[in-house]
Image (cartoon, rainbow, N blue to C red):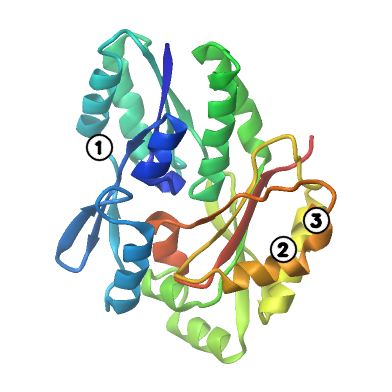
């Protein structure tokens, strides 16, 4: 039997993971003087309440080799094979730790670097679950995941530059100017790294830019997993995006999965961000 393990950078919480039949390996997150297990004893909703109230940016710790070893020992105890899917190796040492831990299990643990995070990692996990349910062997699932992951497109428009400034990713002057001019930065994950790929004046132009970028990469492959996500406690901006981008979805799907971004990306984008994630057409 093959089982899937995934870190909480995929934005899965414990309830969602249990429903999907995967094992969640939570990252540790420190907010102020308190430590939490992401998605286990810290819900996405509680995280955003604390993020807004905290003067300092939350700190997320990678999953180390010892913790992966514990998970792998438990999952392989009955002779199962494990596929471990992680956040991009260019964003965290979590993948490297998983690779090191896997060496002790004689080929019964296979690791996949998603080269993504949040919704991008999420759709790759959903694809893995589909392949597993189709009865494919673990080695073939890993080959297909590695072949498909380069087609993942994660596009997000941010409502505020405040949290990028807090994290030292932009200067205070740039953040102040951006807020003053209502500049909405558009980010993506390119070859495993977060990149600023555009700027828009106001949320409507930001939504239009997301549609243009989706068109530019060849369009959405609706035969593969896709999703929309939002950060914060309100999905108001997301609903506006859905209305503005109707032509992307109308007649192509009756179901658009929507969920709340977790702490891994939420820490850096802050509330009010929206993201669209999909596999580009081949």
Q: Is residue 40 left or right of residue 212?
A: left
Find the distance from the CA under tag 3 to the CA under tag 1.
40 Å
Q: Nearer the viewer, mark 3 or mark 1?
A: 3
Q: Tell me the number on the disc at residue 124.
A: none
Residue at image coords 39%, 64%: 267
Q: Earlier in the sequence, mark 2 or mark 3?
A: 2
Mark 1 sits on what residue? 64
- Indicate the secondary structure of the residue bearing disc 1: loop
So how many labels did they put on this image?
A: 3
The residue lying toward the viewer, choosing from 118 and 111, is 118
The residue lying toward the viewer, choosing from 277 and 65, is 277
Q: Quadrant of residue 135?
A: top right
- Indicate the secondary structure of the residue bearing disc 2: helix
Q: Tell me the number on the disc at residue 210.
A: 2
Q: Is residue 165 visible?
A: yes
Mark 3 sits on what residue? 248
Residue at image coords 75%, 40%: 222
Neighbour tally class for label 1: few under 14, some 14-19, many 20 plus, Cα within 10 Å: some
Q: Earlier in the sequence, mark 3 or mark 1?
A: 1
Q: Quadrant of residue 80?
A: top left
- Asked whether the beta carbons under mark 2 and mark 1 sit within 8 Å of each other, the answer is no
Q: Nearer the viewer, mark 2 or mark 3?
A: 3
The image shows residue 266 at horizontal and vertical percentages of: 43, 62
Q: Is residue 109 visible?
A: no
The residue lying toward the viewer, choosing from 137 and 20, is 20
């Amino acid at each position: 039997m093959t089982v899937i393990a995934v870190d909480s950078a995929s934005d899965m919480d414990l309830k969602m993971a249990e429903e999907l039949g995967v094992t969640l390996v939570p990252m540790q997150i420190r907010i102020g003087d308190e430590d939490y297990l992401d998605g286990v004893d810290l819900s996405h909703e509680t995280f955003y309440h604390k993020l807004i109230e905290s003067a300092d940016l939350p700190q997320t710790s990678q999953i180390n080799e010892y913790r992966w070893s514990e998970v792998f020992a438990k999952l392989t105890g009955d002779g199962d094979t494990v596929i471990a899917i992680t956040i991009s190796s260019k964003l965290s040492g979590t993948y490297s730790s998983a690779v090191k831990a896997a060496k002790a299990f004689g080929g019964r643990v296979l690791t996949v670097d998603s080269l993504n995070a949040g919704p991008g990692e999420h759709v790759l996990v959903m694809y893995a679950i589909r392949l597993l349910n189709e009865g494919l062997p673990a080695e073939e699932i890993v080959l297909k995941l590695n072949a498909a992951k380069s087609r993942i497109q994660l596009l997000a428009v941010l409502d505020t530059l405040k949290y990028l400034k807090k994290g030292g990713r932009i200067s205070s002057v740039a953040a102040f100017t951006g807020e003053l001019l209502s500049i909405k930065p558009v980010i993506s994950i390119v070859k495993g790294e977060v990149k600023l790929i555009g700027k828009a004046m106001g949320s409507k132009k930001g939504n239009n830019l997301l549609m243009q970028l989706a068109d530019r990469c060849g369009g959405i492959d609706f035969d593969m997993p896709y999703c929309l996500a939002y950060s914060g406690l309100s999905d108001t901006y997301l609903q506006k995006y859905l209305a503005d981008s109707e032509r992307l979805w109308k007649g192509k799907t009756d179901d658009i999965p929507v969920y709340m971004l977790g702490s891994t990306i939420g820490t850096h984008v802050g509330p009010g961000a929206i993201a669209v994630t999909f596999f580009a057409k081949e």
